[in-house]
Structures are given as structure tokens and as C-alpha cells.
């Protein structure tokens, strides 16, 4: 599943892909890739000078969601594909919160 944050022009500012995968010879596990799209993000940042510090902080954290998955969510445990739905639920809540705070669109694909 891919989760997006988009601006008022429907340009993607952030996309987060979460999926279950496996490498050769290993069991399945949850993986995550988060990308901030530089041009739309930069335009969004420049259009909100009064919120720039908060925006920078939020999107810095969002760009590190893979680290959160491995270093916090699965810390001390096993990356279990059965947890995929729980990970998606958390990601939805986080991204919807950011979308609401900054009047961005939230889209799932």
C-alpha cells in the first residue's frame, strides 16, 4: 500500500510505501519506504513561513519512518508480517494528523 500527502495542486509531497516482502532464503517481513518529494515539499515550505520550523520537524520525522519501523515498532521483537495491518493503522493516523494540521490531502493507493 502507498500512502500519500498531497498539496492543494494534488502534487505529492510525501509518499510512504508499506508492504510485505522476503529476501531469498529468508522469511517474510514488513518493509517500509518513505520519500519526501523535494520540489513540492520546498514550495509548500516556502508558502508557509510562519510554520516552517514545525513543517521541517514533521517531515524530517516522516522521512525516517523506516527507522521507526525497525528501531521502535519491532524493537526487541521479530518483524512479523502479521503486524502489517497494525503498521498501516499507525501510519494512517500519523499521516492524517499531519494532513489535517497543514491542510494537505491524504490519499491511499
Image (cartoon, grey):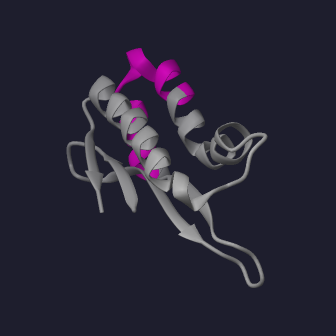
| The quarter of the displayed image where residue 89 is located | top left
Residue 54 in the magenta stretch? The answer is yes
- Residue at the location (63% across, 57% down)? 80
Given residues 43 and 65, the one toward you in this image is 65
Q: Position of residue 6 (x, y in %)?
A: 30, 47
The answer to whether residue 47 is seen in the rendering is no
The answer to whether residue 19 is seen in the rendering is yes
Q: Position of residue 69 (x, y in %)?
A: 63, 46
Q: Is residue 99 left or right of residue 49?
A: left
- Residue at the location (47% across, 45% down)? 86
- Residue at the location (43% across, 52% down)? 85
- Magenta residues: mostly which secondary structure? helix
Q: Position of residue 79 (x, y in %)?
A: 68, 55
Q: From which residue to which does the magenta span run?
A: 39-57
Identity of the residue furthest to the bottom in this view = 24
In the picture, the quarter occupied by the C terminus is bottom left
Q: Position of residue 12 (x, y in %)?
A: 35, 53
Q: Is residue 76 left or right of residue 104?
A: right
Residue 84 in the magenta stretch? The answer is no
- Residue at the location (74% across, 45% down)? 77
Q: Is residue 63 left or right of residue 67?
A: left
Amino acid at each position: 500500500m502507498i500512502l500519500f500527502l498531497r498539496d492543494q495542486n494534488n502534487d505529492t509531497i510525501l509518499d510512504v510505501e508499506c508492504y510485505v516482502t522476503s529476501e531469498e532464503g529468508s522469511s517474510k517481513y514488513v518493509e517500509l519506504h518513505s520519500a519526501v518529494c523535494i520540489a513540492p515539499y520546498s514550495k509548500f515550505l516556502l508558502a508557509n513561513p510562519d510554520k516552517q520550523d514545525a513543517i521541517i520537524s514533521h517531515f524530517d520525522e516522516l522521512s525516517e519512518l523506516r527507522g521507526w519501523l525497525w528501531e521502535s515498532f519491532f524493537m526487541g521483537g521479530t518483524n512479523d508480517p502479521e503486524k502489517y495491518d497494525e503498521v498501516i493503522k499507525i501510519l494512517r493516523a500519523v499521516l492524517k494528523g499531519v494532513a489535517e494540521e497543514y491542510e494537505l490531502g491524504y490519499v491511499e493507493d
